[in-house]
Amino acid sequence: MKTWKLSRIIKAMGSIGLLLTLAAGTARAQTKEQLEAWNTPVAPFRIIGNVYYVGASDVTSFLIVTPAGDIVLDGGLLQTAPQIEANIKTLGFKLNDVKILLNTHAHFDHAGGLAELKHGSSAQIIAMEGDAALLERGGHGDFFFGDAYPFPPVTPDRTIRDGDTVSLGGTTLTAHLTPGHTRGCTTWTMTANEAGKNYDVVFVCSASVLDGYELVNQPGRPESYPGIAADYEKAFRVWKSLPCDVFLGSHGQFFNLTEKREAQRKGAQLNPFIDPKGYQDYVSRNETDFETELSRQKAALANADKTPHKD
């Protein structure tokens, strides 16, 4: 595999397991660096209102605290689960107070720790129907990865659809189906209150088109799953329609986690996580990337159709 292709996959997914498998020879040193970069423990902190950060340096996890118990969104890698548990305790909360576990999408770097977190908390797992079966299979049969990157399987206690809500202790999260990256890719929204003011919080699933996704049917190369391009188009319509004050996501690199946390730690006058422009830029940039890749694949298909065929 060419280096540029590997780099695009790494950037798009932040996938430690994928990098470990693909890297070889002299790239092994880089593998260790990337592993440390994406799964390095970081101190937990409050983002805004009742929303806290409890994930690793790039593989994210969020704790939403309510009077009736707590919610955790995303379980990171299998190796991230102990960090999440420790971060919850460091903040002064208890793992067994976590009543609900949510997921953005059923890839191993976001669902890998769910089984461990459920075991430690007995929380209810809630997942979008498009990804529920993949969670139950532990990642086996993924439309792109096949059986290459499994994780401990979990069976959702409740399966939801687009627009369904999850409520606990006065906090309500709404599930928005934003498919493409996975069939059930879920962007979650909620309202957080800070100093008497309400803020719209958006937890983006992922807008990335992984290198190798087939968006159109080509000879010998069918689309990754039926309707994937239309799903991405739907997802971008949804993202553009969502009001957003606080921009968060399944990878820290999506929303500049490290830089914003450093600004917050240094006492920034305005909360750096309040970033509507950053959200708009993220959506716009990824939509352009998607449209460029779709156009490239359509052009390749058109050229293939024009190629003379020998009888």
Image: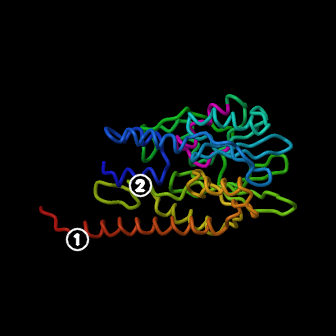
Which quarter shows the C terminus?
Answer: bottom left
Q: Position of residue 184 (x, y in %)?
A: 57, 51
Identity of the residue drawn at 16% across and 68% down: 308
Viewer-proximal residue among 175 and 8: 8
Tell me the kind of residue under disc 1: Lys
How far separated are the C-alphas under marks 1 and 2? 30 Å
- Crowding at dot 1, Cα within 10 Å, few <14 / some 14-19 / many 20+, comes out as few
State the extent of the magenta-drawn residues as a range.
102-118
| Residue 208 placement (x, y as % from top left) | 49, 57
Q: Which residue in the rendered view is the most extreme toward the left?
A: 311
Viewer-side residue, 218 vs 101 = 101
Residue at image coords 70%, 29%: 120
The percent coordinates of residue 221 (x first, y second) are 32, 55
Taking the image as shown, residue 47 lies to the left or right of residue 129, namely right
Disc 1 target residue: 306
Label 2 amino acid?
Answer: Arg
* Residue under label 2: 8
Q: Nearer the viewer, residue 181 or 2?
A: 2
Label 2 neighbour load within 10 Å: few <14, some 14-19, many 20+: some
Q: Which mark is residue 88?
A: none
Extreme residue toward the front, this view? 266
